[in-house]
Image (cartoon, rainbow, N blue to C red):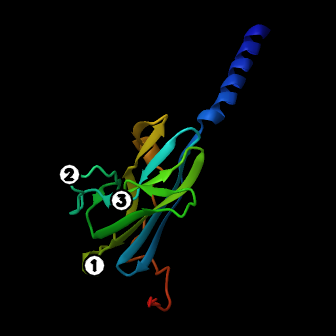
């Protein structure tokens, strides 16, 4: 009996020693929704990605699914995709969204219209989306949140590309709080400043 416990302990210990060489990080660290104006919401989803032994490519472009804009079918550049959800979980088509993924990580480069991260590094990325809904199209029950529905990425190991994406059980956490433009108070106020470069 003690021999079995010892073998089990040694096995678990060996696996624990191997994990750091194959470790990875891909998780969301923050989500927010902010009323900027009486007709505009700012959504952000922050996430961290990186792999110990694999290079990484992440999308820069982000698009709203079920919108009038769809990428060119011939385009091979991956996009992060999201939907705007009503409080009951149904998809809202209200308003117009503009979005992009940003990062200020010093290890990031831009290659092939994507973010590139070398192996052994971890970087923070932030999806930023502005949703504008004209006042006449707003309703009292319009509690809207953003949910990331597709987050593709490509790993490179020993020169071999490995395309991947997060699955729905992981993406459920890439979800912002809901906000209602008619009920929520303005979060940002004050003077507007314009910077002019000469």
Q: Which mark is residue 134?
A: 1
- Looking at the image, which residue is at 43% across and 78% down? 36
The mark closer to the camera, 2 or 3, is 2
Decide which of tag 3 and tag 1 comes sooner along the chain. Answer: 3
What quarter of the picture does the N terminus occupy?
A: top right
Q: Is residue 13 above or below residue 159?
A: above
Camera-nearest residue between 58 and 167: 58
In the picture provided, is 134 more to the left or to the right than 178?
Answer: left
What is the secondary structure assignment of the residue under circle 3? strand
Residue 190 point in image, percent of width and height = 50, 90
What quarter of the picture does the C terminus occupy?
A: bottom left
- Looking at the image, which residue is at 28% across and 49% down? 76
In the picture provided, is 154 more to the left or to the right than 190?
Answer: left
What is the secondary structure assignment of the residue under circle 1? loop
Decide which of tag 2 and tag 1 comes sooner along the chain. Answer: 2
Q: Residues within 10 Å of mark 1 (few under 14, many from 20)?
A: few
The answer to whether residue 142 shows anywhere in this view is no
Q: Is residue 190 above or below residue 145?
A: below
- Looking at the image, which residue is at 54% across and 48% down? 118
Report which residue position mark 3 lands on.
62
The answer to whether residue 30 shows anywhere in this view is yes
């Amino acid at each position: 009996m003690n021999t079995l416990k010892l073998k089990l302990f040694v096995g678990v210990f060996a696996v624990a020693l191997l994990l750091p060489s194959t470790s990875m990080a891909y998780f969301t660290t923050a989500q927010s929704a902010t009323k900027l104006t009486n007709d505009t919401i700012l959504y952000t989803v922050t996430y961290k990605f990186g792999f110990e032994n694999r290079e990484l490519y992440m999308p820069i472009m982000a698009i709203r699914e079920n919108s009038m804009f769809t990428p060119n079918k011939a385009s091979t550049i991956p996009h992060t995709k999201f939907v705007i959800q009503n409080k009951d979980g149904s998809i809202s088509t209200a308003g117009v969204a503009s979005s992009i993924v940003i990062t200020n990580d010093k290890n990031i480069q831009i290659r092939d219209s994507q973010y590139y991260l070398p192996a052994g590094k971890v970087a923070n990325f932030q999806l930023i989306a502005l949703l504008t809904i004209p006042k006449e199209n707003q309703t009292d029950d319009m509690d809207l949140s953003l949910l990331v529905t597709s987050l593709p990425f490509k790993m490179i190991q020993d020169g071999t590309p490995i395309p991947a994406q997060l699955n729905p059980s992981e993406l459920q956490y890439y979800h912002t709080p809901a906000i209602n433009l008619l009920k929520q108070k303005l979060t940002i106020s004050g003077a507007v400043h314009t910077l002019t470069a000469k």
